[in-house]
Amino acid sequence: MSRHLISIDDLDRAAIERVLDRAESFEEVSGREIKKVPALRGRTVVNLFYEASTRTSSSFELAAKRLSADVVSVRSTGSSIDKGESLKDTVQTLSAYDPAAIVIRSPHAGAAQLVAGWTIASVINAGDGKHEHPTQALLDVFTLRRRLGSLDGARIWIVGDVMHSRVARSDILAFRRMGARVTVCGPPTLIPRDIEALGCDAEATLNNLHEADVVYVLRMQHERMRDSFVPSLREYAARYQITSARLNPGQLLMHPGPVNRGVELSGDAIDSPQALIGEQVKAGVAVRMAVLYELLVGSPMLMAVA
Amino acid sequence: MSRHLISIDDLDRAAIERVLDRAESFEEVSGREIKKVPALRGRTVVNLFYEASTRTSSSFELAAKRLSADVVSVRSTGSSIDKGESLKDTVQTLSAYDPAAIVIRSPHAGAAQLVAGWTIASVINAGDGKHEHPTQALLDVFTLRRRLGSLDGARIWIVGDVMHSRVARSDILAFRRMGARVTVCGPPTLIPRDIEALGCDAEATLNNLHEADVVYVLRMQHERMRDSFVPSLREYAARYQITSARLNPGQLLMHPGPVNRGVELSGDAIDSPQALIGEQVKAGVAVRMAVLYELLVGSPMLMAVA
Amino acid sequence: MSRHLISIDDLDRAAIERVLDRAESFEEVSGREIKKVPALRGRTVVNLFYEASTRTSSSFELAAKRLSADVVSVRSTGSSIDKGESLKDTVQTLSAYDPAAIVIRSPHAGAAQLVAGWTIASVINAGDGKHEHPTQALLDVFTLRRRLGSLDGARIWIVGDVMHSRVARSDILAFRRMGARVTVCGPPTLIPRDIEALGCDAEATLNNLHEADVVYVLRMQHERMRDSFVPSLREYAARYQITSARLNPGQLLMHPGPVNRGVELSGDAIDSPQALIGEQVKAGVAVRMAVLYELLVGSPMLMAVA
């Protein structure tokens, strides 16, 4: 495994499997009353979040604490600090503390890659603009592997605003690497033209949704409405909202959260037993513990434990 | 003791006494140089604060840390996140981390009760709108019991804006449950009409204040002035401000903080030896440690220690 | 050593040397994989920051955590809380938790001194208005002592907005106490008239910069431009910007950060091997660990270890 996790492309299939296996063991730790192992005791993890975030930031924070690391969280939603040069200065400052890892979320695609060039810490991309969100993809694969045993041959539809979604991009890479067939579906204005280059099919309607084993619904950003990518939320919902009626029995339903109830997903679909949304969130801590562990401690201890 | 602490009504007198006894032992811990016990090691406490707070949030944070828990703090004063459905999504997300407890403060009455329906964690109400603030009441009872030995028969006046005060509501319930007689006093516009249903008397003037053993002064919210509940701060202070001159020797003075110096309390009263305000704050950490301990560890270990 | 660190004037030369020696041992700890010692286990450090800060607040937070303290961070950039009386109420509240230390940053000169009068905790000034920032000066001296062996006789130029700089004030005191000769240099509008009372010389141009062993460049606050202290950033840069061309070989370059690249410092100077900026930041954690340790544990354990 590389020193950083910037993109799913940093991981071959064996590396993904190794992270997932490790996550299984941390899932067991998280089920104990004492949810803590000493793996990173006395090491420092910096969480550097330039976008508002509840679930990802708290999930990383808790993952690091359950590994016994010391965590320093630096947040800014201000505009002055998230520009190129200031980011460099901030990273160099934080690097002087010799952190084992820097977890970075930024509104700018490529930010995590830049950070990796400025620090000797391991860098974990927690979302960089529209580019990637690899730990989300890993927890999605973890959740699916638990349900399906293997993703080989599984047909996964990703529905919604693929264009602006870092989750979609990381998921397409990860699902395909694990052997799944991926179809993206949404209004043509929200599907990138060159999407087939990523090795997936594109559909403009839900007509063939029945062929999917897994329906992965993306969050619709309200600001896309204002920018006229879709005519209205009502019209979007009429054509693309996933409801229980549109799902076949046996199809699995996923969403990265937070859900816009009544927009991309209906309430009955969210609350149906087909929905894995809660399992996805739950997998987040274990998968992020696994990523931190594999990057910072790595294979030797993997063998020692095995 | 119930699994949650939403309202003082969740506690009978024996349960309150048990929390206070436990708090006495944690007060002793807080007096040591090493202010820490391993009771909640490896367990997770989530602090979810939807209102600005310094003293309550830092008090809960420190209480959890001194019990060796891992603490994750989620804050939002934004308007989009503190609505019903978003709160549910946030709580379900945080619950996926399997926290032992969620401490919730919200501007909406009933929020803590709702949260309890959405999670398997123990829920502690750290203030929900105008409804209740039970740990404040417990620390008030703790402080008074230390001074008086027992609240049985004590006459306690609660002075000020009773109408909008969650502290008043929790205190009335707690003081009465511990055997005290409670009188509320304030401008008629700030006293709920059905206050006698809570088993206390109401007075519109301070004329009979001399009969009180304890004078508990509420914080006057400046926005009440704008809403014309009282004619002006100056007129309010003339009629209801508690000053040293208005207190008898031997009467005890309490306030939940932060004080509006010169509004509901005069400076000389705040700084008088009759004021227990500092002791109240100090009791906060020990009482919150006790509440966390009783909810999460509970009677078995109580017996083991006894 | 005094119980507080409000000003460099609290420290004689022997005390500064003791902090620096202690910092050397913590620098060694920070170089280990497990960057943690149990010195402050179970003790509480409160960080009370009334100004936005990334580097100083995270540096103190990490210093306290590497000493195993429990850290509570209270932040406010709001205007209502940072007034005199509210500060007193906040400090008294936090003091009720019996913290070992309160680290305070405030926009008001003299705030740290006031805090020291309201608490039994040790108070560390992390910057109070235009007054002082003593831990910055200590880490600057630490960095220079490592390079020069001793500051005795060293000629140090401090260049820029001396008038509004708490760093300049603390550095002048510290550098002189360690035996250096200090010259301040900048536009006359930004040099205090009575600066010679601090025992340093003043220059209005960089003409004699060649005589400096160390060039310490201050951060130019953009708001000074708006207040017409200097005609324009461009003109300021033309006359006072430190560039590689203006530096002699062998001169050392320092800056407290964050740098305004292209204003007070040119990019080539920042990135030159003469620049100690990264070493200054790195020294921050070790020096702040040392200050916490000396204030809270002090000489007995120093002897025990020696």
Image: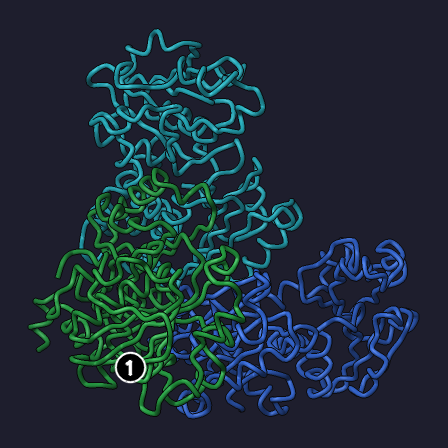
Chain colours: A cyan, B green, C blue
Whether residue C10 sits left or right of residue C268 in the image: it is left
Q: Establish if B243 lies above or below B12.
A: below
Residue situated in front as seen by the camera: A68 or C272: A68
Where disc 1 sits, the SS reads loop
Mark 1: few, some, or many residues within 10 Å (few <14, many ≥20)?
A: many
Res. C101 visible in picture: yes
The residue to which callout 1 is attached is: B212
Give residue B277's position: percent from left, percent from top: 38, 79
Q: Picture quarter containing residue B194?
A: bottom left
Outermost residue on the top side: it is: A207
Q: Quadrant for the C terminus of chain B, please.
A: bottom left
Q: Establish if B192 lies above or below B28.
A: above
Res. A148 visible in picture: no
**Residue in the image at 55% along x and 87% along y:** C18
Give residue A123's position: percent from left, percent from top: 48, 47
Give residue B78's position: percent from left, percent from top: 47, 47
Q: Quadrant for the N terminus of chain B, please.
A: bottom left
Tell me which amino acid carries mark 1: Ala
**Residue in the image at 55% along x and 19% along y:** A229
**Residue in the image at 32% along x and 51% along y:** B109
